[in-house]
Amino acid sequence: MQLPILIDPIAGKSLQAQIAEQIRQLILDGRLAPRARMPASRALAQDLDVSRNTVIGAFARLAAEGLLEGREPIGTFVAERVAPASPTPVAPPAPHPDAAVRGGTRARVRQRLLFRGAAHQVLAPHGQQLPFDFWVGRPDARLFPMRAWQSLLARRLRGAASQLCEYGDPQGVLELREAVAAHVGATRGIATDAGRIVITNGIQEGLNLLAWLLLARGVDVAVENPCYRGAARVFASHGADLRPVPVDDEGIVCAQLPPSAALAYVTPSHQYPLGATLSLSRRRDLLAWAEASGSYIAEDDYDCDFFYDGAPLPALKSLDVNDQVIYLGTFSKSLGAGLRIGYMVLPSELCEPACHAKALLNNCQPWLEQAALAAFIHEGGFAEHLRRLRQLHMLRRNHLCAALAHGLPGWRVAGLGGGMHLVVQLPQEGPDARAVEEMARAQGVGVYGIDDGNAQLFDADADDPLQRVLLLGYAALTEAEISEAVLRLRRAVGVREIARDPLQEPFAGAGAADAISNTE
Amino acid sequence: MQLPILIDPIAGKSLQAQIAEQIRQLILDGRLAPRARMPASRALAQDLDVSRNTVIGAFARLAAEGLLEGREPIGTFVAERVAPASPTPVAPPAPHPDAAVRGGTRARVRQRLLFRGAAHQVLAPHGQQLPFDFWVGRPDARLFPMRAWQSLLARRLRGAASQLCEYGDPQGVLELREAVAAHVGATRGIATDAGRIVITNGIQEGLNLLAWLLLARGVDVAVENPCYRGAARVFASHGADLRPVPVDDEGIVCAQLPPSAALAYVTPSHQYPLGATLSLSRRRDLLAWAEASGSYIAEDDYDCDFFYDGAPLPALKSLDVNDQVIYLGTFSKSLGAGLRIGYMVLPSELCEPACHAKALLNNCQPWLEQAALAAFIHEGGFAEHLRRLRQLHMLRRNHLCAALAHGLPGWRVAGLGGGMHLVVQLPQEGPDARAVEEMARAQGVGVYGIDDGNAQLFDADADDPLQRVLLLGYAALTEAEISEAVLRLRRAVGVREIARDPLQEPFAGAGAADAISNTE
C-alpha cells in the first residue's frame, strides 16, 4: 500500500509531525480502516525520502495516541477500536471561509447537468422479495445450468491470462459471433455470418448503439403503443421524436406507420407488453413500408426462444431481402440477465459504424463469459438447455392458464403464443390494474400493470382498457407455486374462496417440481 | 431445436413437399449445418400440426436426395458431405424484380446513418503479434494472479444462480463499491462511500456517461493537448467543442483553461500521453479555475496504481472540497482490460443521474467478475498483487531507462514518475516518430508515436516536436526482453552495433525473469 502523504520540506512543522498528522487524519477519516496493516517503516521512509527513524517516531506517536498498534514481529496495524463514526464515511464539504461564494459556485455547477433522462425499471419496482412474483422476463434461477457453466468457466480460464489482460475485439469474441450466427440460422432462419454480428451488453446496449447510429433531435422513430419502456426512453434520450403506432392481436398496425420514421422499433415474436405475434401478412406489410419509406426496422426478439404452439415464425430478419432489419437478440431470458450478453445482426452498411460506436462506448465486452457461452453453444449444451426450458415453460404457462380460468374466470387471458409472460385483461367493473397490483402485493404476490411492467403507453386516459391490463411472467414459478399464487390472487381481489381442494387438484401437479429437483 | 418452417394449408403444394422444400433450403443455405441432428419426426409433426407420416415422408425424400441420413436408432442427421460453399454463409440480397426501385431504396436507407464517429485504437494499430511490443497501457499477462482468480470465481459461483439470472443494480454490486471506496480512500486519499460510486465497463464507459450528463452540441470541454484520443472522440461524438490546453512538465497549463468550459478533462497522475505528474500548485490552480468558472473536472486516473519515486500525490479528488471533481478509475491496468471493470466517484448531485444513464445504457455490469473482484480487494489479495506489480514495473522502467541511455543516448527520456509507459523525444536530426515506428516494426519491435499511441494532438504541423515523440509501454516486457528490444531498436535506427556483450551485461539481469517464473 502506498499512502497518500505529502511532505513539505519547508513547512514550519517537523517531518515527523507532518507524517503523524496525515496518517492520523487518514485513520480518523476512516480511509485507513481498523486493523489495516501499515507499510513497513523502512518502505515508507524510502517512499517519502525521509530517514527511517522519522517514520518510526511518527508511528510511535500514533501508537501512544492509541491509533496504531505494533505487533512485533508481524508489523504495525491500525488499532481495532478506532472505528470511525460510519464504516464508510463521506467527507462533509468543508465549510469555506466565504460560504456565499461557494454556494453560488455549487448552484452554477449544478446547472451544468444537461441529462434529463430517467431510466426504465431494471429491478422490480416495489423493491421487495415477494414469495410469489410474476415479475416479467425473469428466468427461473433454479433452472440455470450451473454445473455446466462452472466447468465451462474453469475450462476457458486455463491458459487464458492474455485474454483477461488485453482489450478484445469491439465487435465481440469471434467464436461467440460464429456460434450466434449458427444459432440464429438454425432457430430463427436468419442467414448471416460472424462479420454481421456485434456482441453487446444486452439488448439495451444494442438499442443505444442503433440510436447513436440513426437517431438525433428531430428524427422520427415509430414505436408500438404500448412498447418496451427501455427502448422508448433511450430513443427519447437521443432527442428523437417518438411516433406511437397502435397494436392489435396481429401486432403493430402497419397501415398507421408514419412514412417519416427513420426507424420502426418492433417486437414481432411476442409483442411487448401485450404478447401478440406479428402475423405473416403484417410482416410483409412492415417490410414493404420500410422499402417504400427507405427506413430501418429494429426487431427486438427478446424472448423468441420460447414458442409453444407449433413451430415459431421465422424472424422478420429472415425475410429481409433488402437488408433493412437490425435484429436484436439476448441470452438474458434463456440463461440469465446477470451475464449481460446480447447481440445484433446488422445490415451490411451498419456493421463498421456499429463497431466504432461500440469501441467508443466501452471498448468491448468482458472476455470470459463470451468464451464460455461460445463453447456452450458450439458443444450443444445450450440447445439442450433451451429444449428443457421450453418444455417447463409450456407446462407453467398451461398451468397458469388453467388456474386462472378456474379461479378467476372473469380475467381474460391473452398473449399466450410464446415468451415468458401472458397478459390478463381485468373485468370492466372491478378494480383497475394498479389497485390489483397493490392488493396482490399485500398477499405476497407480484403482478404488474403496463406502467410497472416496464411498458410505455402513449395517449391513454384513465378509461383506457389498457389501464386494466396485468402482465404475469410465469417462467420463474413452479406449477405448485403458481397454484398457490392464484389462490392468493383470488383472496386479494375478494373472490369468495370456495374450497382449496377443487382448485389444488388440477394444478398442483408434481411434474414441474420433480423436473426441478433434477436440474441438469 | 425448433425449425423455422411455415406451413401454408391452402398452398398448391402438398404439406410433405412444403416441409421438404423448406428443410432443403435450410440445409443448402448452411442454416442447418452438416451433421446437425434433426428434430424427431414425432416432435416436428406435433410442432407443425401435421401427421407424423407427412414428416417421415419429407425426411425420406431428403434422404433420397442425399441431404439427410437416418442413423437408427439414434435419429436423423444432416448429411456430412453437403457442406455449403462457405461455413457461415451470408445470404446474397435476392435479386428483386424491380432492381432499380430497390437500388434507390438502398441509397435512401443508407442516408439514414447519422453517426460520423470513429473510434480510438482498441487493439494495437498494426494488427500484428510483435515479439517485443512496447504497446502502451498493457499489463504483463504472465503476472496475472490466475490461481487466485480461478479460485475466487469458483467460490463466488457457488449458490449464485440468482445473481447470474437477474438484472443487477445499475450502480454496481454493493460489495464491490464498498471495496473500491476503501481502496481509493487508502491509496488515493479520497474520502467517499459506496453511494457515490458507479461501476462501469472501464473508464471509456465512464467518459461516455459523463459526456451524456454534461455535454451537448455547442458546449465547451477543455482537454489536454495532446490528450487521450478515446476521450476526445467521445466528447466530440456528443457534439461538444474541444478546447485544447497545452501541457508542460508540470501537466496542464491552468492559466490557459477557458472559463467557458463546462468540463475539463485531465490526467493528473501521469499525463496521457506525455507522462508529466500535475504539480501540487497546478492542482490548486485547477480547482480554483473550476470554482471560478462553475465547471466540473474529470480526473482520469488510468494508471495511478504505479508510482515509483516516493509516495504518490493524492488524487485531485482528495483536494476537492467543493465536490466538482468526477474521478475515473479502472482495473484494466492493475488486473486486466479483458475484465472490463472501471468506476467513477461522483459529485453528489451527479450520482442519481449517472445511475439512470447507466441503466438506460445497458442496465448494469455482469455480476460474476464484480463479485470476485470485491472479494479479492476485501481479502487483501489485490493490495498484495499491486505491491508485487509495482516492484516489477519499477525494475522494468529502470532497466529500460538504463538500456536507452546506454544504447540510444540521443533519445531523451521523460514521463518516468509513474504509470506504465515512458516518453522518448527523438533527436531533431534523425527520422521522425512514424519513420522510427516502421523501422522498429521491421525488427519485430513495437514503439508508438502520439498518433498510433491513441493520443490526439491538436493544431500541430509537421515540424511540431511532438511529431518526434515515441511512447514505450514497459510493463509487459521482462528486463531480458527489454534488453533485446533496445538492441533491435539500435539496429532499426541504424546505430552502429558495437558488441552485444557490453550492452547485454548491465541490463539482462536475471531478477525479473526469476520473479516471473514464480508468479503468485
Image: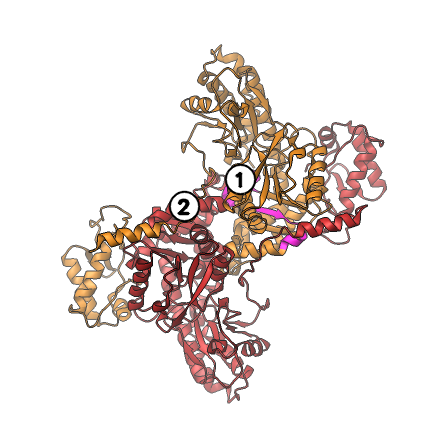
Chain colours: A orange, B red
| B282 up-or-down from A183: above or below | below
Q: Is residue A473 visible?
A: yes
The C terminus of chain B: image quadrant = bottom left
Kind of residue sitting beneath label 2? Pro
Task: State yes or no: discs 2 and 1 in contact (Cβ < 8 Å).
Answer: no
The N terminus of chain B: image quadrant = top right
Establish whether labels 2 and 1 are both on one chain.
no
Hey, which quadrant is residue B391 in on the image? bottom left
Q: Which residue was labeled with disc 2?
A: B353
Q: Secondary structure at mark 2?
A: helix
Q: Residues within 10 Å of mark 1 (few under 14, many from 20)?
A: many
| B415 up-or-down from A277: above or below | below
Q: How far apart in space, not on screen, are marks 2 and 1 (Cα)?
A: 18 Å
Give the x, y percent position of residue B30.
74, 47
Q: Secondary structure at mark 1?
A: helix
Hey, which quadrant is residue B335 in on the image? bottom left
Residue found 69% across the figure and 32% down from its top: A279
Kind of residue sitting beneath label 1? Ala
Give the x, y percent position of residue A212.
55, 50
- Chain letter of disc 2? B
Q: In the displayed structure, does residue B381 sit left or right of residue B442?
A: left
| Span shown in magenta | A331-351
Give the x, y percent position of residue B42.
74, 30
Q: In the displayed structure, does residue A437 sit left or right of residue B97?
A: left
- Residue A232's label in the rendered image is 1
Residue A179 inside the magenta-drawn segment: no
- Residue A166's label in the rendered image is none
Between B357 and A478, the one lying in front of the other is B357
Q: In the displayed structure, does residue B328 sit left or right of residue A513?
A: left
